[in-house]
Image: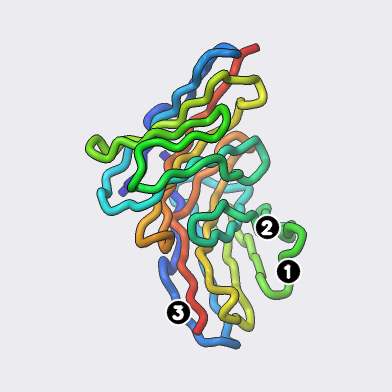
Amino acid sequence: GAVVSQHPSRVICKSGTSVKIECRSLDFQATTMFWYRQFPKQSLMLMATSNEGSKATYEQGVEKDKFLINHASLTLSTLTVTSAHPEDSSFYICSASSSSYEQYFGPGTRLTVT
Amino acid sequence: DQQVKQNSPSLSVQEGRISILNCDYTNSMFDYFLWYKKYPAEGPTFLISISSIKDKNEDGRFTVFLNKSAKHLSLHIVPSQPGDSAVYFCAASLNTGNQFYFGTGTSLTVIP
């Protein structure tokens, strides 16, 4: 099946700094990538949907100036958490899709802000 | 390495019958399992979960069974309804929610 990678898998950063998370589709071209946030034992929360070459569509309540998403190519999307705060600590998951019927998830990135 | 596997990419069931979706995993350290449902062009939504200390969890028409010795998880939907047609993902958690591994999904079609 299709493979989606995320890097890094774990990151620890200090409050006030920015951190970038990469999401790559390794063996297919992803026209759409989704970014999710998940708290322990809770459902995935969709943060934004990005289409290659266009601006991301953010879900209600998600600050687009804080969570910068770039989908520069059909195989790469990045999520940058700017001016990170401890409450941004979470598990971030991306997924990639080449059609509306299939979505392949990355393994996730555990962000800890100290 | 795919630690959570859904070997059936698709499943078709008649309305009113039982739908059984299966999921296998390789890591015996997984401590929590979840099922998600996803409609086309939408993000997945949480459906039901089960802790590794249990073998069954039921919520309305949905029941999840866990067989730890076989490293096997299944979702039962009964009776199946056309609105249940979607892609279902199973996921497994490691380190009490610090890491999640997702299966690749099974597309369920409930035929009216």
Asked whether the beta carbons under mark 1 and mark 2 sit within 8 Å of each other, the answer is yes
Residue at 54% x, 25% y: name it: B108
Q: Is residue A74 left or right of residue B63?
A: right
Residue B4 rendering spot, x and y as whole percentages: 36, 43
Residue that label 3 marks: A12
Element at badge 2? Answer: strand
Q: Earlier in the sequence, mark 3 or mark 1?
A: 3
Q: Give the amino acid type for the residue marked by disc 1 in the picture.
A: Lys
Q: Which residue occupies the foreground of this view, B93 or A34?
A: B93
Q: Is residue B105 left or right of residue A54?
A: left
Q: From what the image shows, is residue B52 above or below residue A16?
A: above
Q: Give the amino acid type for the residue marked by disc 3 in the picture.
A: Ile
The image's mark for residue B33 is none
Asked whether the beta carbons under mark 2 and mark 3 sit within 8 Å of each other, the answer is no
Q: Earlier in the sequence, mark 1 or mark 2?
A: 2
Give how far apart the Cα atoms at labels 2 and 3 are: 23 Å
The image's mark for residue A48 is 2
Residue A76 rendering spot, x and y as whole percentages: 54, 59
Element at badge 1? Answer: loop
Q: Give the amino acid type for the residue marked by disc 2 in the picture.
A: Ala
Residue that label 1 marks: A64
Chain to which the residue tagged by mark 2 belongs: A
- Res B2 visible: no
Residue A13 rendering spot, x and y as whole percentages: 49, 83
Classify residue A60 by image quadrant: bottom right
Chain to which the residue tagged by mark 1 belongs: A
